[in-house]
Image: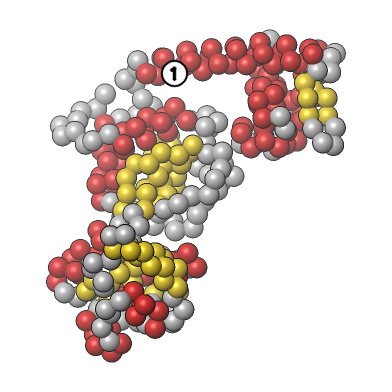
């Protein structure tokens, strides 16, 4: 039966999702690959396993019996693998990881380096970019992303958070006037980071105000470029506190409306539950989520 293994995995995915397209997305392959495996199984067994119509897909009686048996078998294998992994200290393999061009929490990046030192048989390829990557299509094992994410079949876990503040240079404020209310921001030039950053919500206790910004001479796709533009005085900026702590301390930047707060942004790890490296990805994410421990040694 080993020669049917891949086809059985595809067949179980079809039975679980009820559609070739959904099964393909779950396994990270194309629908034609799923169709090939189902046809192969049916040819080998000489039985119709899946009834297809333009409206729905159903399993035949033989298909249902095979699905239940195969699903039990795969679940048993998965549980056995998880038990072995949980009891093993030997971690090895490679991960390709997409990260934001700027990691807003220095402690998070330090934990990544600590993981490499802790596990010398693991290799990490870190790709820093502000372009949002399609994890499955571009063959990433996982990604670190900031803020709200659209609904998807990907698995995600919050591993931290970050807050932004509104800031400007003293010279900018001399040229454009003081900011005393959220509404004052709408008349001032700002450094844009795209449409999502042009509308934001400020809160002060139970009071909430949504601000729409329209005056901008500079639009960027990099948080570091946004910082450079803010420091140059071409607009006020919406920046993470960890990136500008030195500038705030030295007075090169001043916080606007300090009594008002922007929403906290989640730092999330995102990965495919069907990746062949998902066990190593989970170990890595668990390590990032755990509190740091001094004096770690390689295992």
Give the residue at x 44% y 27%: 279
Q: How is the image coloured?
A: secondary structure
Q: Which x, y percent locates residue 281? A: 42, 33
Viewer-side residue, 157 vs 208 = 208
96 horizontally vs 51: left or right: left
Q: Is residue 5 above or below residue 26?
A: above
Query: Can you name the residue that lies furthest to the bottom here?
Result: 175
174 horizontally vs 200: left or right: left
Viewer-side residue, 166 vs 145 = 166
The quarter of the rendered structure image containing the N terminus is top right
What is the number of callouts on the image? 1
Q: Answer yes or no: is residue 91 visible.
A: yes
Q: Is residue 297 above or below residue 88?
A: below
Picture quadrant where residue 115 is located = top left
Query: Can you name the residue that lies furthest to the front here?
Result: 206
Q: Which x, y percent locates residue 43? A: 83, 18
Q: Which x, y percent locates residue 72? A: 60, 12
46 horizontally vs 233: left or right: right
Q: Which residue is mark 1?
A: 82
The quarter of the rendered structure image containing the C terminus is top left
Q: Answer yes or no: is residue 220 visible.
A: no
Give the residue at x 34% y 80%: 184
Badge 1: few (under 14), some or many (20 or more) residues near its Cα, within 10 Å? few
72 horizontally vs 166: left or right: right
Q: Secondary structure at mark 1?
A: helix
Viewer-side residue, 91 vs 184 = 184
Give the residue at x 45% y 68%: 199
Give the residue at x 67% y 30%: 17
Q: Is residue 211 above or below residue 92?
A: below
Q: Which x, y percent locates residue 93? A: 42, 30
């Amino acid at each position: 039966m080993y020669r049917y293994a891949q086809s059985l995995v595809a067949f179980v995915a079809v039975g679980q999702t009820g559609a070739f397209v959904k099964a393909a997305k779950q396994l990270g392959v194309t629908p034609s690959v799923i169709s090939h495996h189902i046809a192969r199984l049916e040819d080998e067994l000489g039985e119709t396993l899946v009834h297809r119509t333009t409206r729905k897909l159903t399993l035949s009686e033989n298909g249902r019996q095979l699905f239940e048996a195969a699903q039990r078998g795969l679940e048993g294998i998965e549980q056995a693998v998880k038990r072995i992994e949980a009891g093993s200290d030997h971690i090895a393999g490679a991960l390709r990881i997409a990260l934001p061009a700027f990691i807003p929490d220095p402690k998070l990046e330090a934990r990544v380096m600590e993981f490499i030192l802790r596990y010398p048989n693991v290799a990490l390829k870190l790709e820093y970019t502000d372009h949002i990557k399609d994890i499955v299509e571009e063959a990433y094992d996982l990604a670190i992303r900031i803020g709200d994410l659209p609904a998807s079949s990907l698995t995600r876990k919050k591993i931290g958070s970050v807050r932004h503040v509104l800031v400007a240079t003293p010279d900018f404020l001399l040229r454009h006037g003081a900011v005393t209310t959220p509404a004052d921001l709408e008349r001032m030039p700002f450094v844009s980071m795209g449409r999502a950053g042009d509308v934001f919500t400020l809160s002060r206790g139970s009071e909430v105000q949504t601000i729409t910004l329209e005056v901008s001479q500079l639009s960027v796709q990099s948080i570091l470029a946004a910082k450079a533009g803010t420091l140059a005085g071409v607009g006020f900026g919406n920046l993470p506190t960890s990136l500008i702590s030195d500038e705030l301390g030295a007075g090169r930047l001043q916080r606007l409306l300090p009594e008002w707060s922007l929403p906290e942004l989640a730092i999330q790890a995102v990965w495919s539950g069907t990746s062949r490296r998902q066990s190593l990805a989970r170990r890595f994410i668990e390590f990032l989520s755990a509190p740091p421990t001094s004096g770690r040694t390689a295992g």
